[in-house]
Image (spheres, rainbow, N blue to C red):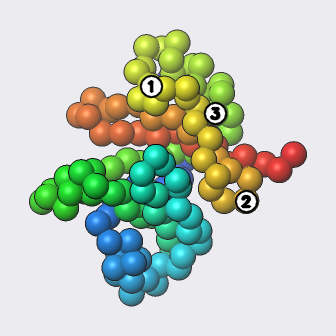
């Protein structure tokens, strides 16, 4: 069994959207509250991200641009992009899963993102049916 003593459970569900404000309003109508909002600057247009929470359940809404956004708009089913699981030690989780033969999807993993108070580090693997499973650690300020 992998990640014994390291895996803490569910962190968030990643959902690509074509209109961030419209999707936020939809989930807020069910009582979700915006917990974080950030634009990530890539080369051309930012990736707009919002984390919404309700009863210890977090949805990550993110709006890509250009061709990626068009592809998402063309989907009829399967809009959920990834499930993220909390770990205590991202570097240990990365080393363990890489050594076990899992293919890591990101180059230079674990990847840092400036989310929440002190940032997060993550990496992603594929499940047996192509689903993406993200392992994620909240970083502390120390």
Describe the element under mark 3 as helix, strand or loop.
helix
Q: In the picture shown, does residue 21 fall above or below 2?
A: below
For disc 3, the marked residue is 90
Q: Secondary structure at mark 1?
A: loop
Quadrant where the C terminus is found in the figure? top right
**Residue furthest out toward the right:** 142
Mark 2, secondary structure of its residue: loop
Horizontally, is 55 left or right of 120 in the view? Answer: left
Tell me how far mark 1 sits from mark 2, CA to CA: 26 Å
Looking at the image, is 3 positioned above or below residue 132? above
Instruction: Let me know if residue 70 appears in the view.
Output: yes
- For the residues bearing labels 2 and 3, Cβ distance under 8 angstroms: no
Tell me the distance, in whole angstroms, between the alpha carbons under discs 1 and 3: 13 Å
Q: Where does residue 85 sit, x and y in percent of width and height?
A: 51, 45
The furthest residue to the bottom? 29
Q: Earlier in the sequence, mark 1 or mark 2?
A: 1
Estimate the x, y position of residue 24 in percent, counting from the top left. Answer: 41, 77
Determine the residue positioned at 14% across, 58% down: 74
Q: Which mark is residue 12?
A: none
Label 3 crowd bin: few (<14), some (14–19), many (20+), radius 10 Å = many
Mark 2 residue crowding within 10 angstroms, few (<14) / some (14–19) / many (20+)? few
Residue found at x 39% / y 83%: 25
Judging by the rendered image, the residue that carries numbered circle 1 is: 104
x 73%, y 59%: residue: 117
Q: Which residue is mark 2?
A: 117
Q: Tell me the mark number nearer the camera, choosing from 2 and 3.
A: 2
**Are the residues at dot 1 and dot 2 in contact (C-beta closer than 8 Å)?**
no
Mark 3 and mark 1 in contact (Cβ < 8 Å)?
no
């Amino acid at each position: 069994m992998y990640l014994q003593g390291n895996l803490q459970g569910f962190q968030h569900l990643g959902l690509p959207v074509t209109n961030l404000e419209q999707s936020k309003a939809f989930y807020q109508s069910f009582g979700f509250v915006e917990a974080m909002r950030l634009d990530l600057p890539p080369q051309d247009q930012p990736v707009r991200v919002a984390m919404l929470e309700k009863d210890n359940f977090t949805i990550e809404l993110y709006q890509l641009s250009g061709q990626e956004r068009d592809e998402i708009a063309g989907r009829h089913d399967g809009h959920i992009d990834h499930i993220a699981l909390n770990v205590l030690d991202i570097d240990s989780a990365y080393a363990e899963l890489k050594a076990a033969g899992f293919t890591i999807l990101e180059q230079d993993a674990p990847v840092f993102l400036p989310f929440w108070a002190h940032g997060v580090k993550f990496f992603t693997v594929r499940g047996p049916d192509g689903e993406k499973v993200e392992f994620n650690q909240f970083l502390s300020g120390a």
